[in-house]
Amino acid sequence: MTEILSINNLSYKRNLTSILKQVNCSAESGSIIGLLGANGAGKTTLMRLISGAAKGFHGEISINGNTQDIERKQLVSFSHQLDGVNSHDRMEKIAEFYQAVYPDFSESAFKRLAEFLELDLHQRLGNLSKGNRMKFIIAITLSRQVQLYLLDEPFDGIDSMSRKKIIASILQWKPVDATILISDHHVDDVANILDAVLIIKDKKMVVSEKADKIREEYGQSIEDYYESIYTGGKEND
Amino acid sequence: MKFDDKIPIYYQIKQYIYREIIIEELKPGQQIPAIRQLAVSLTVNVNTIQRALSELIDEGVLVTQRGKGNFVTTNTRTLVKLKNDVVEAQVRELYDQLSALNISPDEMLLYLKTYINSRKEVHHD
């Protein structure tokens, strides 16, 4: 397999506060990768940096060999939180907006996903339950035809039926060679579907490991392994 | 399907397919579902399914027909050996656990026989 994403010596500060230090990691093309870490560990920041939404870091982020912010923006679909979107707008209208903004947005992919996720596109954004709002975000994010998808905490605070549906939609519609990075702090949600895990702790990437290797070589569940990293820890700093 | 997260998922998928074949939920020569369909119905990653299937193909349990998909082997010897292997693994586990309790082989047989009889009685009621 080829590498779609490679990060070398990435450091990032905001207002003189260090947020990420010397991060190194890579992702194989076609895989589903869990980005794990406690709240505030730097998961969202790392995704914003990968996607080109946040700038001014040290080191290198390369997607298929492209290192410029502008190039990366076009190669990555990052799950938006729809913060700037008018909550009176209907989902179909918001989708039209995305289609106009992103040339790689596939209308047919969006229709398929929306149908699979049982979304009623006539509904207004502000009237959606938390679960349906996240389903809509997932549908929009996965409708762009790109090589790398970043899903930031897609299961945070949503009911288990919505979670299962979202996981099924990922498994059903992920193109074979597309890569998905999913951040989460509840490992159990996604453990089954991960090829590999990245664990961030204390601003650093402390683990990059294949999921079945953790089970095979350490005899641990992903969750136990993750907890052992956080509580015992290989590093104390 | 519920997975034990301490055991590699691809391994558990292999065991699952072995069982389906042994109980003839999947019959000799029958086509198995497409990879994507298996991934969605078992809620695991496509790559994990692929790894399990490619090992099953290497073992001769599944046979690939180019452009058509994967089928359960019709080779009787392979199927008999598969069943023996799976049963033996279960028996081995039981044997090891009882050995660890200092139960002798003769006692094991006795326990097993008594237990089977008690299950039979329950069955008759």
Image (cartoon, coloured by chain):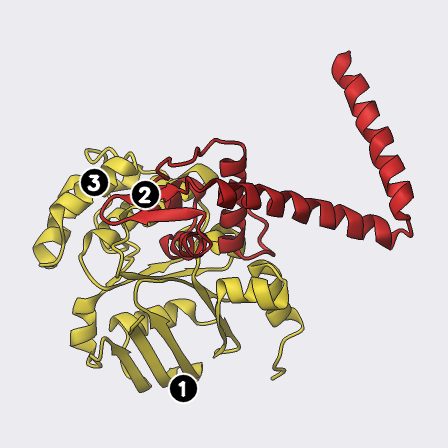
Q: Could you tell me which residue is drawn at 14 percent across and 53 percent down? A: A98
Q: Which chain is indicated by disc 2?
A: B
> Crowding near pointer 2: few (<14 within 10 Å), some, many (20+)?
few
Residue A167 in sight: no
In this rendering, position of residue B15 left or right of residue A32: right
Q: Which chain is indicated by disc 3?
A: A
- Gap in angstroms between the C-alphas marked 1 and 3: 45 Å
Provide the secondary structure element on which disc 1 rests.
loop
**Relative image position of residue A215 (x, y in whole percent):** 57, 62
Which marked residue is nearer to the observer: mark 3 or mark 2? Answer: 2
In this rendering, position of residue B74 left or right of residue B69: right
- Gap in angstroms between the C-alphas marked 3 and 2: 20 Å
- Gap in angstroms between the C-alphas marked 2 and 1: 52 Å
Nearer the observer, B84 or A169: B84
Residue A8 in sight: yes
User: In this picture, is A25 found above or below B36?
Assistant: below
Residue type indicated by callout 3: Arg
Colour in which the image shows chain B = red
Check disc 3 and report the residue beneath it: A112
User: In this picture, is A121 found above or below A50?
Assistant: above
Q: Could you tell me which residue is drawn at 23 percent across and 64 percent down? A: A147
Check disc 2 and report the residue beneath it: B34
Check disc 1 and report the residue beneath it: A16
User: In this picture, is A194 found above or below A68?
Assistant: above
Colour in which the image shows chain A = yellow
Residue type indicated by callout 1: Leu
Nearer the observer, A134 or A226: A226
Quarter where residue A216 is shown: bottom right
In this rendering, position of residue B82 left or right of residue A125: right
**Relative image position of residue B108 (x, y in whole percent):** 86, 42
Quarter where residue A166 is shown: top left
